[in-house]
Amino acid sequence: MERVFQIISDDGSPIDAHFGIESDEVVFHSRGGTKGRGAINSEYVLGLSVLLARLKRASFAVERVWVDSSRVQGIPISKRTILTSEEGQAPVDQIVKVLSTRMKAVGRSSSESSGGNSTRRIRMTISGGDAQALSLALGGTPVDKKLRSLDQLPAEVLRGVTAEHIWRAVQDLVCGIDSFGFAESTDYDLIVDENLRLPPKAVFGLAATRALGFQILPKHFTVGVSSVCFLLLEDAGFCIVPKGALMADPGLPALHEDRVWTEGQPRLVAHLRKERAQGVSVAKKAEFKKNHGRLYCERCNMDPLETYGAENGEACIEVHHRTVQVAQMAPGHLTSLEDLQCICANCHRVVHRELSGG
């Protein structure tokens, strides 16, 4: 685990810049906030210059430097590298200029017009000694300063997590896949069904790892009412409730004809529970639109946008469990998105009537 140090100048005065040591790597933390109150690592350039000078003075070699900020973790290190071992032999002032210039371009598209960020979190591989020797050479003061907020991903990055990612994360957790770095929930539960609740942060962490292509940890996002995490989980069709709170049975039929047909028919009741399970409808529709570009009825091929218009047409497409009849499912059967089909409300009513034997 990285231990954080504050850089101290040669005359003993503190510099507002922080670094960490992990084995043979040094992490130099990014600048954040504005000048004055709330600023973090405001003396970034001065601190980086002092750190590099001390490495040279102690005969440590900088083998490689790369941008290590959270939002570019999905990019290969080779594409984030901003200094090689040969370039690390240059004078300190030249190295600082090279790093400042190159880090601006990492993760940016050619169409972006702004100048980029020259005070980002960077990571250096160092040769010439172990972590203890590095600590002595760099002379920092250990601090308990919380730099976690600098690791948090921007909201626009988190919004890359879709309902399908969230549904698959729920299935992974139900199957026993480990949610690395995430603990049991303490304040809120995500409702899967009447018998199962999951920690919302773990669900979102797994979903974001799948969506963004790198390991998402608790430090990368926050949870709570109105957080991006909770909003996306709820948009995906899941309910989040305070720890231990009760909620209504999500599987009860809402339509009059369903209530009539399910009386005394446990097979149809079970079928409806499966179809109306938390999150399944939103996830299936998201997957279907990703694969086909639009929603349409798989039974009668009706296109809701052509029939009803763009604003509200898709509301008539529902999700039906087709692959395995509920009555034939083994205990603990997990529904996959491939088990489901998108059909219009009219066809869905007909299918339910057929299931009821009416």
Image: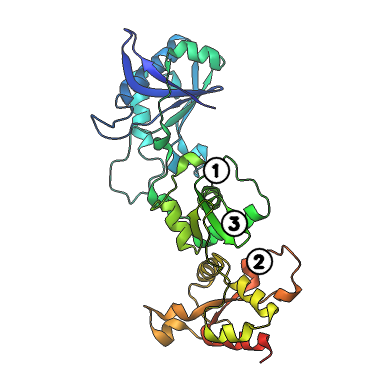
Rendered image: mark on residue 335 = 2
When the figure is inspected, residue 139 is found, relative to residue 67, above or below; the finding is: above
Which quadrant would residue 149 be assigned to in this image? Answer: top left
Numbered disc 1: secondary structure: loop
For label 3, the crowd category at 10 Å Cα-Cα, with few meaning under 14, some 14 to 19 and many 20 or more, is many
Label 2 to label 1, Cα distance in Å? Answer: 26 Å
Residue at which label 1 appears: 215
Place of residue 44 in the rendered image (x, y in percent of width and height, measured from the top left): 33, 25
Considering every residue shown, the one lying at the far top of the view is: 11
Q: What amino acid is found at the position of numbered circle 1 in the picture?
A: Gln
Quadrant position of the C terminus in the picture: bottom right
Rendered image: mark on residue 170 = 3
- N-terminal-most mark, 2 or 1: 1
Q: What amino acid is found at the position of numbered circle 3 in the picture?
A: Val
- N-terminal-most mark, 2 or 3: 3
- N-terminal-most mark, 1 or 3: 3
Label 2 to label 3, Cα distance in Å? Answer: 11 Å
Between 83 and 126, the one nearer to me in the picture: 126
